[in-house]
């Protein structure tokens, strides 16, 4: 359970979920025809040395004997990859990745000259990430600036201190983030983001309900999968379920033009045929919404 001011590194608490995401990005990347390619994801998992995720790499979870890999993390990752590609094509050269975790887009994607990518996360997570990338001689494809701050704290001040231009159109991402923030911190995050986004700015958000239905996820994993993707932790136990604004409604009400897509919409867009799931597992998997929005007015 979460507590006020709690902390984590890459193998504890919320940090462990970032390691799980990297594990499934690595598995997606290893498929014969992957939706995404992330050659850094496996490096992070092996460097962390966490036994459960090393086991998942070697032997992914199965559903009725079918590996539960194709598409599930690939869809989410490709959505955010394509969002940044679209922003870059529109001329946006300032990028902010909120709760960057083990995101390696500064290294994976082709960025236009002059692009600056700011990565915000806790110091322990960024230090681990930097060490692994340096050990493997990785070179970013844009200017990368890390901002070591908890998103429950005054991250706008830290971002400004790192050199971000509040007057420049910015591409923001909030991937796998919002449920891990208290409601007040989520709402403050959107207010800060809005204030730092002149017209032409863009944001991509994974919007996941934080209601009681999420508490069923661990039960569903145990019921249908031969092993739990996240091992002994239940990500839903790390979620905050207090009141908060609906991201789509909030953005729409503050001058952003918003497009929302369900996982099934992304699968159709990307031409991916997903394995058939039991009804209650399908309902849970279809709960997130992927929002892309453009700031169209002040």
Image (cartoon, helix red, strand yellow):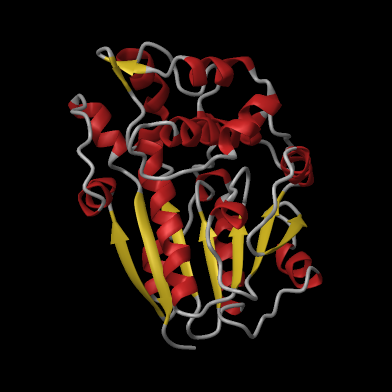
| Above-or-below relation of 293 to 270 | below
221 relative position to 157: left or right:
left
Q: Is residue 192 visible?
A: yes
Q: Residue at x 53, y 62 (%)?
A: 110
Residue at the (43%, 43%) spot, across then down: 210
In this rendering, is residue 50 above or below 149? above
Q: Is residue 256 left or right of residue 173?
A: left
Q: Residue furthest bottom?
A: 298
- Give how far across and how far down residue 2 sits, in percent: 63, 35
Q: Examine the rendering and report whether any part of residue 208 can be seen.
A: no
Instruction: Point out residue 201 in the picture as x, y percentages from the top left corner.
Output: 50, 78
**In the image, residue 107 above or below residue 51:** below
Residue 181's spot in the image, x, y percent? 58, 48
The quadrant the N terminus occupies is top right
Relative horizontal placement of residue 164, taking residue 273 as reference (left or right)? right
Give the image location of residue 88, x and y in percent: 49, 72
The image quarter in which residue 33 lies: top left
| Quarter of the view holding residue 170 | bottom right
Q: Nearer the viewer, residue 135 or 46?
A: 135
Of the pair 37 and 54, the residue shown nearer to us: 37
Picture quadrant of residue 4: top right
């Amino acid at each position: 359970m979460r507590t006020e001011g709690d902390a984590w590194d890459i193998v504890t608490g919320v940090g462990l979920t970032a390691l799980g995401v990297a594990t499934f990005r690595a598995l997606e990347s290893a498929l014969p025809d992957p939706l995404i390619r992330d050659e850094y994801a496996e490096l992070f998992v092996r460097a962390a040395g966490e036994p459960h995720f090393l086991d998942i790499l070697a032997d992914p979870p199965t559903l009725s004997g079918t590996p539960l890999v194709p598409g599930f993390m690939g869809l989410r990752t490709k959505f955010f990859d394509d969002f940044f590609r679209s922003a870059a094509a529109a001329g946006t050269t300032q990028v902010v990745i909120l709760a960057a975790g083990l995101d390696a887009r500064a290294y994976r994607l082709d960025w236009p000259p002059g692009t600056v990518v700011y990565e915000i996360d806790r110091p322990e997570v960024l230090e681990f990430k930097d060490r692994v990338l340096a050990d493997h001689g990785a070179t970013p494809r844009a200017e990368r600036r890390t901002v070591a701050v908890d998103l429950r704290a005054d991250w706008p001040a830290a971002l400004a201190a790192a050199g971000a231009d509040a007057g420049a159109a910015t591409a923001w991402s909030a991937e796998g983030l919002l449920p891990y923030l208290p409601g007040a911190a989520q709402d403050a995050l959107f207010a800060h983001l809005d204030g730092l986004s002149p017209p032409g700015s863009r944001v991509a958000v994974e919007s996941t309900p934080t209601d009681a239905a999420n508490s069923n996820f661990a039960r569903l994993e145990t019921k249908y999968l031969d092993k739990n993707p996240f091992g002994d932790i239940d990500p839903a136990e790390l979620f905050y379920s207090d009141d908060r604004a609906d991201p789509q409604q909030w953005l729409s009400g503050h001058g952003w033009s918003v497009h929302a897509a369900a996982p099934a919409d992304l699968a159709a867009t990307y031409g991916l045929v997903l394995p058939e799931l039991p009804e209650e597992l399908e309902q849970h998997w279809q709960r997130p919404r992927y929002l892309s929005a453009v700031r169209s007015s002040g």
